[in-house]
Image (cartoon, rainbow, N blue to C red):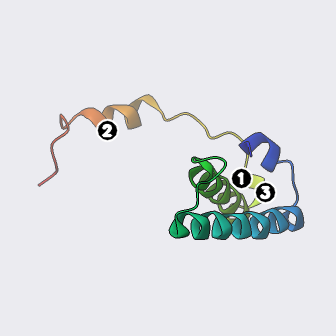
Amino acid sequence: MDYNDLKNLNAQELAKKKTDIEFELMKARAQAARGTVAKNPHQIGGLRKALARIQMLLAVPAASQSTPAKASASTRKNRTTNGGKAKA
């Protein structure tokens, strides 16, 4: 499920989606553990990503779900001034 689709859902709908995806993920993992060939071999990864998106949306308050501001020039400069070396 796409992020843009999920962000339009309310908290109750997200919670229901979360339980549905967790159940589907459990079934897919059990199927893989038995060695049964899945219909879609990439299903587990997709379900995990969808679950992570939902968990992120549930954890973040609705007011801060707008697009993030870009980092200022000084912040970008500070990230690269040490040449990738760890600080002592």
Q: On the rendered image, what quadrant is the C terminus found in?
A: bottom left
Q: Position of residue 4 (x, y in %)?
A: 77, 40
35 w.r.t. 45: above or below:
below
Q: Is residue 67 above or below residue 23?
A: above
Of residues 60 and 54, the one drawn nearer to the viewer in this rendering: 54
The answer to which of 60 and 14 lies nearer the viewer is 14
Looking at the image, which residue is at 77% across and 54% down? Answer: 63
Determine the image quadrant of residue 74.
top left
Pointers 3 and 1 in contact (CB under 8 A)? yes
Residue shown at 54% from the left, 69% from the top: 34
Label 3 SS: helix
Residue neighbourhood size for the residue with mark 2, other residues' Cα within 10 Å, grouped as few (<14), some (14–19), many (≥20): few
- Disc 3 to disc 1, how far (Cα)? 6 Å
| Element at label 1 | helix
Residue 75 as seen in the image, left or right of residue 21 = left
- The residue carrying pointer 3 sits among few (fewer than 14), some (14 to 19) or many (20 or more) residues within 10 Å by Cα, namely few
Count of number-bearing discs: 3
Residue 55 position (above or below residue 82): below
Going by the numbered disc 3, the residue's amino acid type is Ala
Q: CA distance from mark 2 to mark 1?
A: 24 Å
Residue indicated by mark 3: 62
**Where on the picture, by quarter, is residue 29?**
bottom right
Tag 1: residue type? Ser
